[in-house]
Amino acid sequence: MAPEKFAQVRQEAAAKGIEFVDLKSLDLNGRLHHLSLPFDRFTPEICTEGIGFDGSSYGFLKVEASDMVLIPDLDTAVIDPFRERPTLHLFASAHLTDDSRTPFSQDGRHIARKAERALASTGVADLSHWGPEYEFYIFEEADFASGKDESFFSVQSNERFHHNAYHACNPFDLHDDFRDEVCRLMKSFGIPVRYHHHEVGKHGQHEIEGWFADLLTTGDHAVLTKYILHNAGHRAGLRITFMPKPLYENAGNGFHLHQFLTQNGKNVFNDASGYANLSQTALYYVGGILAHADALCAFTNPSTNSYKRLVPGYEAPTVRTFGRSNRGAAIRIPSYVTDPELRRVEYRPPDFTGNPYLCASAILMAGIDGIINKIDPIERGWQPADAPSQESRKDHEFLPRSLDDALDALEADHQFLLHDDVFPEVLIRRWLEIKRDEIGRINQRPHPYEFTMYFDL
């Protein structure tokens, strides 16, 4: 920590009448936690020694040896508008309790930093840029329970559409003012917004599209966007969900990630002579992602509900291929991009049920592997239907159909994540354990639809 930086942050906070400092951090699964301290306890020692917490409650360590510390990131300081008393928000990362306060290797923010360093070590690019799309449903009411003698969910949307809901206009779009307010709050947190609109889902589906930032900042923005939407929804008496498939036979929620790489500020994905103006580096990057797409799903689509979204018929990506303007492909190349410095690819499978730092870092590591090993997606048979070369040989090579399949793929294929010690092996093992436990808990419980099918058989 630079003493000058701490002095600057503290002085500016004091001038704004800050009374509390709130440290926010994600657990391994991607759920947000926080702790607050009085402003007079915000000292230089907090930023070097950290504040102790129970790492086992975050899914990081076993309960027998779970002492860890949270150390705030001063670069993330911003006023939190959702607290009644003036409060300064700071992201914090997990560290060990040794004398050096070693960064904890399974913390998502540390992994994001290591992934960017791994990219720079290739010599091909020194920075990744990410543009997220946040899709979510707004319900006026939501109730659910799962006990020994009852299991149900009930959601209610006051919207009524008998036509295409995509980009629907007010007054039929009931929550455009709410999205305006959310975007205002995002701006107060320093999160850039490209636009917002009603999405395809006719019962309250919406989208806010962000703008490009580096990997770590994109993860921070994703966490805060979810925080803002849940809190703004609570204030407005609305229920927000990012579940990939909250409604049967309706569009699902994705966390699409547009991305490109730069070297010394120059977009290395751009080549006017390449397919869809993509360079060979970009194609290798695409090849790496597609080669590891099954394993990636364990981090990009890490819930049992994820695979209810990844089905044909709802603009969800289902096929291991790439193409210009193809929303059914895993990777879409937006054809509307004219600025060569924004030449990019969009990875469409991810959803927002996981840890955004791990999700984006895993995608970047797959792309790096493609660049290092020159994985050409066209040679592998994953080329788009409009490619000028040979016919595609793998038009129907589908992504995993279940979380169980994705976990099997991750167990068999994760060496690319271990490159440069970005993902530790222990995290992979822990992730497999956590997610297989989730599958087991789902499989042991009766499903409401089973009563429809079998109760009176």
Image (tube, grey):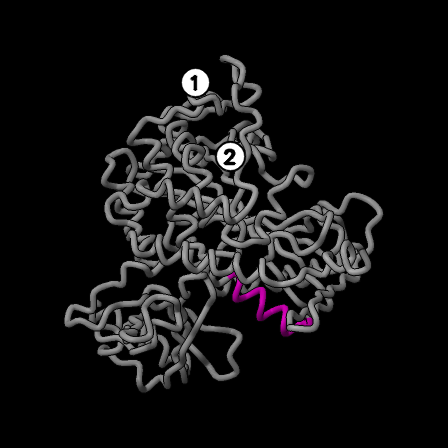
Q: CA distance from mark 2 to mark 1?
A: 20 Å
The residue type indicated by label 2 comes to Ile
The magenta stretch is: 225-237
Closest to the observer: 30 or 89? 30
Q: Nearer the viewer, residue 392 or 151?
A: 151
Residue at the outermost front position = 457
Residue under circle 2?
331
For the residue pair 453 and 72, the one nearer the viewer reads as 453
Q: Is residue 177 left or right of residue 276?
A: right
Instruction: Please tell me which of labels 2 and 1 falls first in the chain.
Output: 1
Q: What residue is drawn where x is 31% and y is 47%?
A: 115
Provide residue 109's location: percent of width, then percent of height. 34, 58
Which three-letter amino acid code belongs to the residue tagged 1? Ser
According to the image, label 1 marks what residue?
273
Tell me residue 108's x, y (percent). Answer: 36, 58
The quadrant in which the N terminus is found is bottom left
Measured from the top left, where is residue 147 in percent x and y? 64, 72
Q: Is residue 109 magenta?
A: no
Disc 2 on helix, strand or loop? strand
Q: Is residue 97 visible?
A: yes
Circle 2/circle 1 CB separation < 8 Å: no
The numbered mark at residue 265 is none
